[in-house]
Amino acid sequence: MEKSLGIAIIGAGITGLTAADHLVKAGRDVELFDKGRGSGGRISTRRTENGVFDHGAPEIQAESGAFRDFLSALGAVSGECGSNFGAPGMRSIFDPLISRLDINQGAEVAGLARESRGWVVRLTNGRSVAHFHTVLVTAPAPQAQSLVASVAPKLARDIDAVSMQPVWTCLVEFDTPLPLPGKLSGRGRVMRADRMASKPAREDAREAWVIHMRPEFGLEDTHVDRAIVAPLILDAFGETYGLTLPQARYLDAHRWLYAFANQPLGRPFLGDAEAGLLVGGDWTLGRRAEHGFESGLEMAKAVLSREVVSV
Ligand SMILES: Cc1cc2nc3c(=O)[nH]c(=O)nc-3n(C[C@H](O)[C@H](O)[C@H](O)COP(=O)(O)OP(=O)(O)OC[C@H]3O[C@@H](n4cnc5c(N)ncnc54)[C@H](O)[C@@H]3O)c2cc1C
């Protein structure tokens, strides 16, 4: 499909959404592509017959004024110590943004090509979208690396500096309440656990929990079935907190293959606006949503400043 030159953003997590928001507000034509069924990336909520589970980031900490303002403009609910939440789920934070952006969901990008008229985005379904003057890639580092490897090998080699850790997550609803506070900041093999109903502004009477294990958990077998892993996480959780757990009425697990950067890059993005290809994400600056926000904002600013210079 042929279109006027605009900006393509691959990934509609907080990095891509932040960049898109900034560029669209500056009057630019932006099209996003995300392989997921919904936007938000690792700030994710699963909707089930039993209600919602925030199986990605359980909360979003905001340190800078700019990030606090961004979240507050979206209507995020603020909690204690700079924490922010969506309601009814974490992903709801992005609803106001998603409704005003041009996002292709279920659009997995297979690769990029550079033609004389601009960038071509090739999707795994065989469709190609062209031409864009700039592409921003905001996938986790290993996925971004494979997307740019054929068109920018030097850039792909630079991404090698960043590796990412997996995390196993358990989604569970118990029949009866656990004698625990609603937020557990971790012990032993458990990295973090949250009762969904304990988050602010939730109308939720369930005893539903999301338990994130430390990256070391499950590493010995990377292809284990989630139906096998979910009960193993429950066993570890019960053992860690000295509890005999009640019956689970909902139980599932999710594996985040690229949850966190081991060692962030140390600058907000790679590539340059002159070449029309930039790569960013939380992994450039850290392992929290705020780092994705900063990366997305800096990429958008770089694109806009380059356009001003070239006028
Ligand atoms: C278990 C867990 C707990 C966390 N806890 C916290 C916390 O307490 N506080 C906090 O601030 N942060 C937390 N985080 C981190 C936070 O979720 C991330 O920092 C943030 O979501 C990263 O956003 P991003 O946009 O950079 O990447 P992502 O959210 O990963 O978005 C990248 C997007 O790219 C898409 N994509 C990838 N490849 C392709 C492709 N080929 N084609 C099309 N689309 C593609 C993906 O579908 C995804 O939507 C946690 C993360 C996890 C996994």
Image (tube, rainbow, N blue to C red):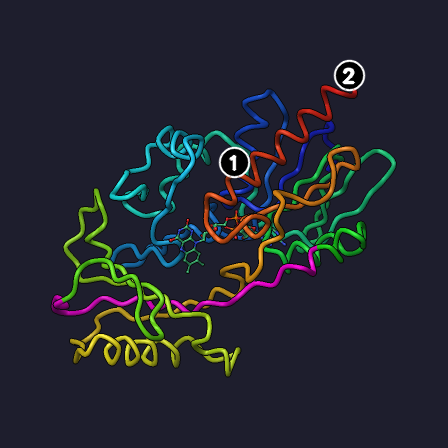
Residue situated in front as seen by the camera: 269 or 277? 269
Residue 169 belongs to magenta span: yes
Could you say where residue 193 lies in the image, as x and y percent from the top left?
Answer: 29, 63
Mark 2, residue position = 311
What residue range appears in magenta? 159-179
Near mark 2 (Cα within 10 A), the count class, few <14, some 14-19 or many ≥20, is: few
Residue 223 belongs to magenta span: no
The number of callouts visible is 2
Residue situated in front as seen by the camera: 216 or 244? 216
Ligand 1: does it lie within 8 Å of the C-beta at label 1?
no
Asked if residue 259 is positioned above or below residue 216 in the image, the reply reads above
Which mark, residue 18? 1
Could you say where residue 237 lies in the image, as x and y percent from the top left?
Answer: 27, 75
Q: Residue at x 37, y 28 (%)?
A: 73
- On screen, residue 159 versus residue 90, left or right, reads right
Q: Amino acid at mark 2?
A: Val
- On screen, residue 124 versus residue 48, left or right, reads right
Q: Amino acid at mark 1?
A: Thr
Where residue 272 sits, quadrant-wise, is top right
Near mark 1 (Cα within 10 A), the count class, few <14, some 14-19 or many ≥20, is: many
Could you say where residue 37 lies in the image, as x and y percent from the top left?
Answer: 48, 51
Q: Residue at x 60, y 20 (%)?
A: 27
Instruction: Decide which of tag 2 and tag 1 comes sooner along the chain.
Output: 1
Could you say where residue 138 lies in the image, as x and y percent from the top left?
Answer: 60, 47
